[in-house]
Image: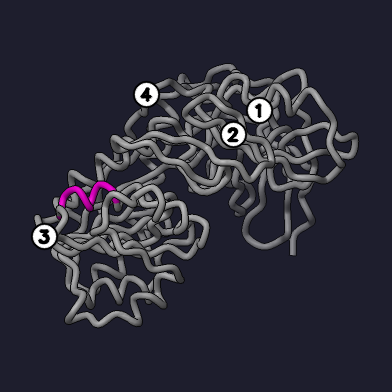
Amino acid sequence: MSEEWTGRRIELEIGSVAHGGHCVARAEGRVVFVRHGLPGERVVAEVTEDKGGSFCRADVVEVLTAAPERVEPPCPLAGPGRCGGCDWQHASPAAQRELKGAVVAEQLQRLAGLSREVEVEELPGGPLGWRTRVRLVAGRDGRAGLRAHRSHRVIPLAGNGCPITVPGALDDVLARTWRPGSEIEVTADADGQVHVDSTGVAVQRAAGRDWRLDAHGFWQVHPAAADTFAAAVGEWARAPRTGRVWDLYAGVGLFASVLAEQVGPRGNVLAVESGRRAVVDGTANLVDLPQVHWRSGRVEDVLDALDPDDERPDVVVLDPPRKGAGKAVVDAIAEGSPERVVYVACDPAALARDLATFAEHGYELAGLRAFDAFPMTHHVECIALLQ
């Protein structure tokens, strides 16, 4: 085994982008996952983590030859060894979207055998000031901040704020001290109200409706995301009038509301959600849509208990957590033989794995859209149509 490299500085040529907010380089036969670099650059990188084996991790500490897409990060805390909240502040917004598109395409090719160019669409509002929900942590001195990348070390935000967060949302939080180690949840709702560590009700607006929900329950982080995704899902779902639809991992019912309008009062939307508070909020928000029927529980358990002959869907929409739906859920959906499946994904690797499983049941990828719902970070949202 070679010597441990942590702390060592290496001159590298940066290769292609990889999933997770870094690029790939190679040194002495080993793979180096490099943050704060861009493809094609020549850099000096310092190894930050080395557990032996075939790879290690490093941060760019000096740029010898810069890529044309490199820009000055808008946040002074975005550099090596500092805040881990953002991955791509050193790349222009257009370059960030190209990098994310390349990651989605690579994951589809590698994990699902699908060759497809991916264009990542920009959401309204620009790359800064979009984040409406933030979880901070108090450092030893009681000041609120965010953790460094792959570390428990807290980077205090006081004096700098957070450029990607909605303006004003963190002002009160950063102006006071907190119990060291405590986590602080902040949500800015559609009415401009800021909710801090409360169990209050936030107001959100999307799909032509006002939503009242648990202030820190699940809702899209980008102000334009919920409306954009609801429209995209509705366009591809095209649920038939009086039809039957499954909305899996339904949250508070954003997509269920769209599907319910499509199937009409004589149709049926089965909304499945494991979070009990989300089900309570969803039931209250969609009380005017009695065609939406809620089931609380793990998706795989609810589907396992269904009679596929009596409750066979015309269309299925699913928005699973980051790990994806998994084989059991995909198999259950395929057993229901829906004509179309609309899959909303926050992780391209999980999406690709599930698409490969769908393919085993004869479903083909008929459409794919990707959205830059998390500018400056490596995260990307995808919506896939399967037929």
- Relative to 198, say whether 308 is above or below: below
What amino acid is labelled 1 in the image?
Ala
Q: Nearer the viewer, residue 229 or 10?
A: 229
- Disc 4 to disc 1, C-alpha distance: 23 Å
The residue singled out by tag 4 in the image is: 124
Q: Residues within 10 Å of mark 4 (few under 14, many from 20)?
A: some
Q: Which residues are magenta?
A: 257-263
Q: Residue at 35% of width from left, 59% of height from top?
A: 352
Of helix, strand and loop, which one carries label 2?
A: loop
Indicate which disc residue 228 carries: none
Q: Residue at 46% of width from left, 19% of height from top?
A: 68
Percent of width and height locating residue 112: 31, 62
User: Which callout, 4 or 3, points to the residue nearer the camera?
Assistant: 3
Ranked by sequence position, the earlier of labels 1 and 2 is 1
Percent of width and height locating residue 151: 75, 47
Of helix, strand and loop, which one carries label 3?
A: loop
- Residue 85 in the figure: left or right of residue 307: right
Q: Residue at 40% of width from left, 74% of height from top?
A: 300
- Disc 4 to disc 3, C-alpha distance: 35 Å
Ranked by sequence position, the earlier of labels 4 and 2 is 2
The residue singled out by tag 3 in the image is: 242
